[in-house]
Image (cartoon, helix red, strand yellow):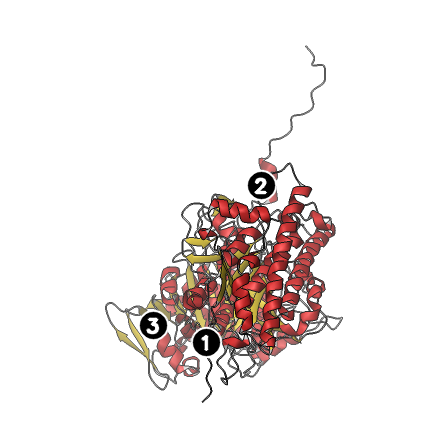
Amino acid sequence: MQFPGMGRPQVGFIIDADLGNSIDDVLALALLYGLEGKNECRVVATVTSKSNFQSAALFEVIGRFYAGAVSAAFAAVGRTLPVGMTGNGKSSPSTPILDAPLARKTPENTPLYVHGIESFNDTADPLAVLRNALTAQHDQNAIVFLAGPATNLAKMLELPGAVDLVAAKVRYLVVSAGRFGAGDNDPQIVADIPAAQKLFANWPTPVIAAGAELSSFAPFPGALVDPNFAWSKAHPVLDAYLAAGKMPYDAPTTAMHAALYAARPKADLYKLSSSGTITVDANGRTAFTPAANGKHNYLIADPAQAETITKIFVELASAKPVPRQPRFRRPQADVDAAKPKPEPAKPYPPKP
Amino acid sequence: MITRKALPRRTFLRGLGAAVGLPFLDAMAPALSAAPKAPVRMAFVYVPNGIDMRHWNPEWEGPMQELPRILKPLEQFKSDITLFGNLTHNNGRALLDGAGDHGRCCGAYLTGVQPRKSAVDIKVGISCDQIVANEIGHLTRFPSLEVGLEDARQAGDCDSGYSCAYTNNLAWRSEKQPLPPVLDPRALFERLFGTGANLTPEERARQTKFRRSILDFVSEDTKRLQLNLGPTDKRKLDEYLSSIREIERQLQKAETDNAQVDPGMPKPYGVPADFAEHFRLMTNMITVAFQADMTRVLTFLVTREGTSRPYREIGIPDGHHPLTHHRNDPALMEKVAQINTYHTTQLAGWFEKLKSTKEGDGSLLDNSMIVYGAGLSDGNRHTHEDLPTLIAGRAGGAFKGGRRIVYRKETPMCNLFLTMMDRMGVHAEHFGDSTGRVDGLNLS
């Protein structure tokens, strides 16, 4: 909730990802929560385009993890955003990234990571989540982050007034999808080609794409996982990482690049293509056509920044949760300090 | 070929300064034609300050099981009711407008639009009842009826900068024009049955003085009509006219009671002092209005949003609104639950009347769809999701009833209203912040 007359809060991230299909989405989510802990942004909506309760559940688990303190029983309470989920009538298969953290138990054999998603109706209508989150943001104070098929965003654009709403509220859309160079077509685009075509054609704000060619640039170093996540006995991101491959392995980072650029666009960590237009052909191949008035760009790796980026990735993705303070309530210590000190009692009657 | 001229659907019994509509009679259908289809009525009954959701939401979904405490009074209508879960009004939320949830939730309830935060320059949207009334209102004497039970001002600031127009009205004819509810039973009665405009002040005084029934004024017309009716229609007409007479008797009693209860206080003429009696009187008249097809669209603001009305009649002298900010005090929460249950008890009385009123092969309730709900769920925290909502009636056989349907979180309430508008024959592409229509409600 935001209140007028109290200044604009940090930029709000609206996240739409097929969480569970690739570890870099999980790491990107951790990175954004890490940035939220540093008060650089806010995560204001989460939507999964993977039609699987487990995916929505992991979104909620990670959100709860970063919302509050971690106890031995991981009973973190705090804000829980409704998690939107694509409901196409078919459940997409679960993955070890989802299964591993959600299967963890306490010594009492209860789920270690608490979440409230047990059925389809515990997830939210993704279009309403996306649209409603936008209505609650100040103008030009939202960033939409897409790491997965464009299904939800393309449909959301079809809601009445949605294009104008997006134009008013969103600074830019950052897309972790496509390929801008040689290689196979990106499966994230291929998963829903018509949606991707609509999204690039109709999205009204600037779009910055991080293509699959960035996947191996500045990978997340597997050797640094254990030492950096060791502060917590129970960390859902770590559990997902360990389940996603045979350790030690370096994780792909396309979504992390997209997230980092989105949050710190002026940090000169990446090169940016010229302006142009991204299109998607019938086979799901993305193409970039330079155009002076184009609204699209794509990220280009800058090898000179690889080491810096890796350090930032590790620092942010493994950051400890910082429970969010009520924004407009001063810390109690400050309130107490500001109170006038009581004067010491004077003897009565006063001495002459 | 057998033909018979049917009695027009909009026949009135007329007399001096009075016109009484008629219920649907067999004589109104042409001979040998297919059985006439009764019209569907759409109504919205709104209660303020949210509802104690601990005693509203059951743990089950699907076919009806044991009803929670607040819904218990509706037990006998289990098969006529559909309960909903997770319906949300995003535009009731603060978004960027700060405090004022009571003003916003009521203004947004039937409009689906976030009200402009102003005590003077009001703006919201056309409410769904009025969209329907605009389309089908020409078919009935009144395009819509707006009723309520609590007197309230229409101007000024009623909630953190929100105009009283938002908290005290449900129906909006245009973005800037609310339709204030009729509160006085006498005024509603005269609006429905008496062409008061034709009466001189002297005639009105004379009518009041001698307490003549409005039926006396139309007795000649009634006799003429009865000559042409079959036995079923005669019985139906008798029952109908008796119910009007009963309302008149209640009105007179209410006015007499008022004088006895509080002779020294200026009270609105004709408004019963007792909440339950007021509720019963108004809903009796609504029933007759539905029965006579005087209108098919109703909004009923039980009490104004944010009201601090006490309920001394059930032993609760505290204001309703302050009670809902109970800070989890069990004693205060108990009182809120009692008020909520008291409301549904009155509602059950109305449903009973509707169900016992036969129409075609079913009842008036069968041919209605009556939304009962609130613009807040938890009145303590001012939440706008999972709003307490039920529909009574089967919309003329379209709705299954007897179930609880839990939708996905954040499902817009406007999706339900859009689906209801369809049933009224008004097919809009979207309404308010709808993202589509709701599933599971229809038989098909």
The residue positioned farthest toward the bottom in the image shown: B1
Of tags 1 and 3, the one toward the viewer is 3
Q: Residue at x 67, y 46 (%)?
A: B257
Which comes before the other along the chain, label 1 or label 3?
1
Which comes before the other along the chain, label 2 or label 3?
3
Q: Vertically, is B152 above or below A30?
A: above
Q: Vertically, is A214 above or below B284?
A: below
Which residue in the structure is indicated by mark 3? Answer: A202
Of tags 2 and 1, the one toward the viewer is 1
Q: Residue at x 66, y 54 (%)?
A: B276
For the C terminus of chain B, the image quarter is bottom right
Instruction: Using residue B250 as the reference point, say whether residue B204 is left or right of it.
Output: left
Q: Are marks 2 and 1 on the same chain?
A: yes
Which residue in the structure is indicated by mark 1? Answer: A148
Horizontal and vertical percent for residue B17?
Answer: 48, 55
Which residue in the structure is indicated by mark 2? Answer: A334
Give me the C-alpha separation between circle 2 and circle 1.
44 Å
Horizontal and vertical percent for residue B67?
Answer: 71, 68
Instruction: Using residue A140 as the reference point, say whether residue B183 is left or right of it.
Output: right
Q: Chain of mark 2?
A: A
Q: Quadrant of residue A226?
A: bottom right
| Observer-nearest of A203 and B432 | B432
